[in-house]
Image (spheres, rainbow, N blue to C red):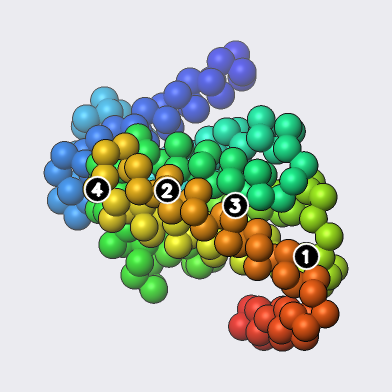
C-alpha cells in the first residue's frame, strides 16, 4: 500500500510539472497561475501547492529533471573514453541533446534565470543541488581521464568546465539554426581549444598563470 501510494504521488508530481511546462509554453510564464496549472492537471489547487510551493519551484524541478537526463546520457561516453577531449565532447553533446526538445520555450525561462535575485539563477542557493550535480559530471570528466595536470588546477577545473558549459547553454538559447546545428558546431570547435589550453597548463611557463587562475577562482568563491 505504501509503495503504491509513493508511485501515485510521484506520478501526480510529474503530471503537474509536465502540465506547467505546457502552459508556460502556451500562455507564458507570468500569465500562468498555479490555479490554472492545477485545473489543467486535474488536481486541486491545494494538491498542487503540496508538491510545489511556487511556480519557481516548478521550473527548478524541470531543471533538476533535465540534469538527471544529462547525467544518464553521459554514462556511455564516460565509460568508453579515457582521453580528456572525447570525454568532454561527449558530455557537452549529451547536454545539448537533452536540451533540444525544450528549445521552443527556453528563452521564456532564461529571462527569469538571468535575474540576479531570482531563485532560478544558476548561482542561487536554491539552484545549489542542481549546480553541484552538474559540476560533479565535469569532475567525472576530469577524474576519469588520463589528463595529467597540476593537482590544484585539477581540483578547480570541473567548475571552470561547468562555467564553459553555461556559455554553451546561453548560445543554445539564442540559436535559431535547424536542430540547433550551430550549437553542436560550437561545441565541436571549442572543445579542442579547451583541451589545448588545459594541456598547456603543464608547460613550465604557464604554471604560474595556472596557479594565479586557481587563486582567482578561490578568492571569488570565498
- Above or below, comparing residue 215 to residue 139 in the picture: below
- Element type where label 1 sits in the image: helix
Q: Which quadrant holds residue 37? A: top left
Q: Quadrant of the N terminus?
A: top right
Residue that label 1 marks:
154
Query: Which quarter of the figure is the C terminus placed in?
Result: bottom right
Q: CA distance from mark 2 to mark 1?
A: 27 Å
Task: Determine the CA span between mark 2 and mark 3.
Answer: 22 Å
Residue 66: x, y in percent? 48, 41
Please name whichever residue, 4 or 96, is drawn nearer the observer in this view of the structure.
Answer: 96
**Whole-number angstrom distance, CA of label 3 to CA of label 4:** 25 Å
Residue at the spot of label 2? 185
Q: Tag 4: Cα neighbours inside 10 Å, few (<14), some, or many (≥20)?
A: some
Question: Residue drawn 31% across and 37% down?
Answer: 179
The residue at 66%/84% (across/down) is 216
Residue indicated by mark 4: 176
For disc 3, the marked residue is 134
Quick one: SS at disc 3?
Answer: helix
Q: Nearer the viewer, mark 2 or mark 3?
A: 2
Q: Kindly state the secondary structure of the residue where label 2 is placed.
A: helix
Q: Nearer the viewer, residue 69 or 78?
A: 78
Q: Position of residue 175 (x, y in %)?
A: 29, 51
Amino acid at each position: 500500500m505504501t509503495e503504491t501510494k509513493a508511485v501515485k504521488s510521484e506520478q501526480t508530481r510529474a503530471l503537474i510539472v509536465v502540465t506547467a511546462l505546457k502552459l508556460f509554453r502556451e500562455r507564458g510564464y507570468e500569465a500562468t497561475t498555479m490555479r490554472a496549472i492545477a485545473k489543467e492537471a486535474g488536481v486541486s489547487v491545494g494538491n498542487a501547492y503540496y508538491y510545489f510551493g511556487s511556480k519557481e519551484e516548478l521550473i527548478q524541478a524541470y531543471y533538476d529533471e533535465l540534469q538527471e537526463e544529462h547525467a544518464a546520457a553521459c554514462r556511455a561516453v564516460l565509460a568508453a573514453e579515457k582521453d580528456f577531449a572525447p570525454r568532454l565532447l561527449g558530455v557537452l553533446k549529451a547536454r545539448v541533446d537533452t536540451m533540444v526538445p525544450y528549445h521552443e520555450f527556453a528563452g521564456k525561462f532564461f529571462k527569469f534565470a538571468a535575474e540576479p535575485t531570482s531563485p532560478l539563477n544558476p548561482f542561487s542557493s536554491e539552484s545549489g543541488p542542481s549546480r553541484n550535480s552538474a559540476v560533479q559530471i565535469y569532475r567525472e570528466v576530469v577524474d576519469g581521464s588520463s589528463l595529467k595536470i597540476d593537482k590544484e588546477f585539477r581540483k578547480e577545473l570541473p567548475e571552470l568546465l561547468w562555467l564553459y558549459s553555461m556559455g554553451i547553454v546561453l548560445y543554445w538559447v539564442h540559436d535559431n539554426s535547424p536542430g540547433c546545428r550551430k550549437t553542436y558546431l560550437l561545441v565541436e570547435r571549442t572543445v579542442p581549444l579547451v583541451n589545448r589550453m588545459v594541456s598547456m597548463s603543464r608547460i613550465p611557463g604557464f604554471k604560474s598563470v595556472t596557479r594565479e587562475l586557481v587563486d582567482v577562482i578561490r578568492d571569488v568563491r570565498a
